[in-house]
Image (cartoon, helix red, strand yellow):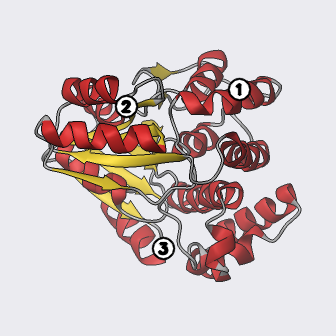
Amino acid sequence: MIAFVFPGQGSQQVGMGSLLADNFPECQETFEQADSALGISLSSLCFEGPAERLMLTEYTQPALVAVAVAVARALTARGVKPALLAGHSLGEYSAHVEAGTLSFADVLRTVRNRGRYMQEAVPVGAGAMAAVMGLDEPKVVQACAEAAEGQVVSPANLNAPGQIVIAGDREAVERAGERARALGARRVVALAVSAPFHCALMRPVEERLAPELRSLVVSDPVVPVVANLDAELKCDAASSIAALVGQVTAPVRWEQVVRRLASEGVDTYVEVGPGSVLGGLIRRIHRGARVLSVSDPESVAGAESMLAG
């Protein structure tokens, strides 16, 4: 059984999608639709940069969705079709485009706003995120609780066994990192991010984004999406939107998402979009699974020869 999984912020790179647009008409059309929906040349930003602009969250988010949707369309046009879908953080929006829950144009406009709201919610430098390696969830929760001192710090991404990202106020994240080391963490690595995602500091984002999401035309997903919020299958429009609203301030439960996909019978994961971060995490969670990362014509052809039919 095949699942498509869609990457989140951090996988972007200048040049992404260019070869797809050159080689596949459905991909070229996808980027033309993206440019039209946003009223800017998102395609040239993906293909040519500049990197500094592509790294701005309000452009990064729609750019990644556009590339992921282009890859998904190239795959499905060649007979590679998923039984289940999931995405990491922002990637959940790409999954809902593939599922038919939301229109591509609506998602592009929504995630552009989502990115802008995230950047505006916390002054640059006031928040932080850090990856805690080699410590289980209860001890990471303990480290955060003991380090908070009235500030915000909490698990933000439960990515894989022994890899949990924390987020919150910069000083609290630093204190929690020190506490995590004292509790046995192997390493704590500060992440280069523009805002502290998936924590209580994102509450203003949720308040601004929720009415926008609830105002969109929504359909029941034609392929179930396993949500970051609770690792449950979303098979109707209302619960799909509720999960997208809830994930703004809640941790991304990626390890649980992959375990849920596996329990449903998934044995083949296709990472749809730039990078191979999710593939690495999935290999740690679901040992023995087949994992393909697809982002260019060559990997599309490889997936087609292996999985189409």
Q: Residue 98: image x %, image y %?
A: 59, 44
Tell which tag, 1 or 2, sits nearer the viewer.
Answer: 2
Tell which tag, 2 or 3, sits nearer the viewer.
Answer: 2
Q: Say which amino acid is labelled 3.
A: Asp
Q: Residue 245: image x %, image y %?
A: 63, 25
Residue 264 seen in render: no
Mark 1 or 3 closer to N-term?
1
Mark 2 or 3 closer to N-term?
2
Image point (42%, 77%), residue name = 298
Q: Say which amino acid is labelled 2.
A: Arg
Q: Secondary structure at mark 3?
A: loop
**Disc marking residue 296:** 3
Residue 200 shown left or right of residue 103 in the figure = left
**Disc marking residue 219:** 1
Q: Which residue is mark 2?
A: 253
Quarter assignment of residue 221: top right
Image point (17%, 43%), residue name = 181
Q: Secondary structure at mark 2?
A: loop
